[in-house]
Amino acid sequence: MKLADTILLSLSAALVIIGTHLTMKVGIDASYPVFMFAVALLFWYMYRKKDNEEEGSSAQDMPKKKKKR
């Protein structure tokens, strides 16, 4: 897991906690944008994770060249 992936996942979790706190204090109207931003970051994290897995699998599928001696 790269640093950017870790930051995205941590920020998404922090925003869920902040959104929950806002819901209890102010109401769902005030916390809705925070939850949507958290979901967007989570989707971005999942997209990056899926993209990295596909890059790894395509590199493994390619045959390796033999070295000449």
Image: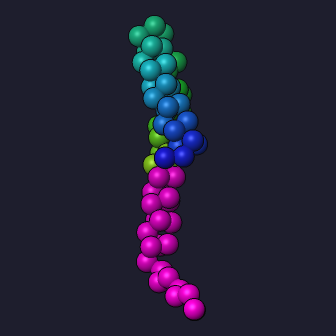
Find residue 16 and report its horizontal and vertical position in percent.
Answer: 45, 25
Residues shaded magenta: 47-69
Q: Which residue: 47% across, 52% down?
A: 49
Q: Is residue 57 magenta?
A: yes
Q: Residue furthest bottom?
A: 68
- The one nearer the camera, 51 or 26, is 51
Find residue 27 and report its horizontal and vertical position in percent.
Answer: 45, 13
Vertical comparison of 5 with 26: above or below? below
Asked which quadrant contains residue 21, the reply is top left
Q: How many marks?
A: 0
Vertical comparison of 34 with 56: above or below? above
Find residue 20 and report its horizontal and vertical position in percent.
Answer: 42, 18
The majority secondary structure of the magenta stretch comes to helix
Q: Which residue: 52% across, 52% down?
A: 48
Residue 35 appears in view: no
Which image quarter holds the C terminus? bottom right
Q: Is residue 23 left or right of residue 7?
A: left
Q: Residue furthest top?
A: 25
Q: Residue furthest front?
A: 69
Q: Which residue: 55% across, 36% down?
A: 7
Colour scheme: rainbow
Residue 30 appears in view: yes
Q: Is residue 61 magenta?
A: yes
- The one nearer the camera, 4 or 45, is 4
Q: Which residue: 52% across, 88% down?
A: 66
Vertical comparison of 4 with 13: above or below? below
Find residue 35 and report its horizontal and vertical position in percent.
Answer: 47, 29
